[in-house]
Amino acid sequence: MQTQLAPAFQGTPDGTAAEAILRKCVHCGFCTATCPTYQLLGDELDGPRGRIYLIKQALEGEPVSRKTQLHLDRCLTCRSCETTCPSGVEYGALVDIGRRIVDAQVPRPAGEQAVRWLLKEGLTSPLFAPALKLGQALRPLLPDALRQKVPAKAAPRPPRWPTREHPRKVLLLLGCVQPALLPNINSATARVLDAAGIQTLVADGAGCCGALRTHLGDQSGGLDDMRRNVDAWWPMVATGQVEAIVMNASGCGVMVKDYGHALAGDPAYAERAQRISALTKDLSELLPELTPLLQPQLQLRNAPRLAYHPPCTLQHGQQLRGGVEMHLKALGFEVSLAPSESHLCCGSAGTYSVLQPELALALRDRKLAHLAPLAADTIVSANVGCIQHLQSGTSTPVRHWVELVDEALHEAG
């Protein structure tokens, strides 16, 4: 697809990057078949091909409007279209560029601006945990729409963090909302790795991976989050103290693996960011070596039947497909995928479920309907957003897969 950039974008980083991506697009339309919003709405402008045309027009200097902004906002950035695309179009990067260009020309209403500011500042704030506790205490009194966003207080589980030291060490990013929303995921991760002879370290100063601000249009703030994490991790990385940086939230994983690209233009951080990205692994990527070490230690006599929902950030963003369910089966779990549409987004997509609630709930219910025939005792996933979003629509427990492995080890011990 050829484009003639408007003078304002010629020679700029966004213009150059977008032009290179657009050249790959052959406008075949394969992507529409795997786009969640196109499946729901049936509007070409709410599919990747239509959005690409809107972005192309903006780059060529055509007028943009609130309608243009709305069609771009409706994109989940699930990147399912990238998995489908035969030409390798990096749609996720292109839509981020398109949003920046359109947002610079189309001011958002004050209410939208306020919500977006609260999300990017509130979810990354130390005040998030006490605010969540207050919301949980008042949950029965909240309006239904807000109550769905506040999870019920979880039953207490052992928060024990392993104290044994091992020669093998990894860093773990705790995340910005996960420690408050679902704290057991991080401690379960540390316990499972401990059982396999790997010590889990946490760097003081590391925080939000940068995805939240970046996808809310605050590119500068997102880059600052990335730099802060690079600074926090670098002393242990530079000395070879850790062999990997582990992500148990696939949304964080896809962002940290992109640090090398995002900070490539920063001479002070480019080399270190590239090293950080190269060391980053989703927790599931450790399963091939963990499985033979853990399997003899597991007790699975009363293991629940599991339905696995693969997050988009894992199967499309990180292009890791099949590993979790395959290795859970190797560990002895009974686990199945939805019989259809396992590749489609559940509607969580970071802050999408707050900003686009109608579409998010429709996708959530569609996902749960496809999981229902499995009659699972527990639904498992690999990203805190997916887990919380799905749980808001079902009484079936929804958990991170590592929690089930941890419990099987605990029962055996």
Image (cartoon, rainbow, N blue to C red):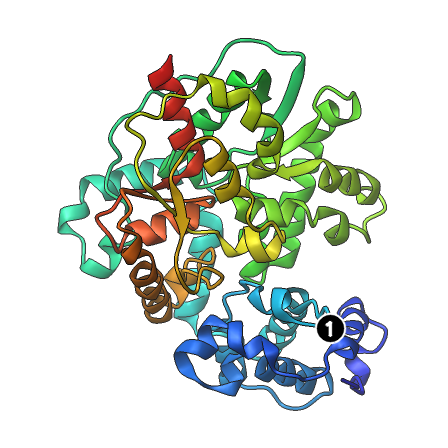
x 42%, y 29%: residue: 405
Residue nearer the viewer, 3 or 218: 3
x 52%, y 72%: residue: 34
Q: Which residue is mark 1?
A: 87
Residue nearer the viewer, 222 or 114: 222
Residue 129 at x, y percent in the picture: 36, 36
Q: Classify 302 as above or below 37.
A: above
Residue extending farthest left? 141
Residue 48 at x, y percent in the picture: 58, 77
Residue extending farthest top? 164
x 46%, y 71%: residue: 36
Position of 7 with respect to 207 (left or right) is right
Q: Quadrant of the C terminus?
A: top left
Q: Classify 4 as above or below 208.
A: below
Residue 305 at x, y percent in the picture: 31, 40
Q: Is residue 406 visible?
A: yes
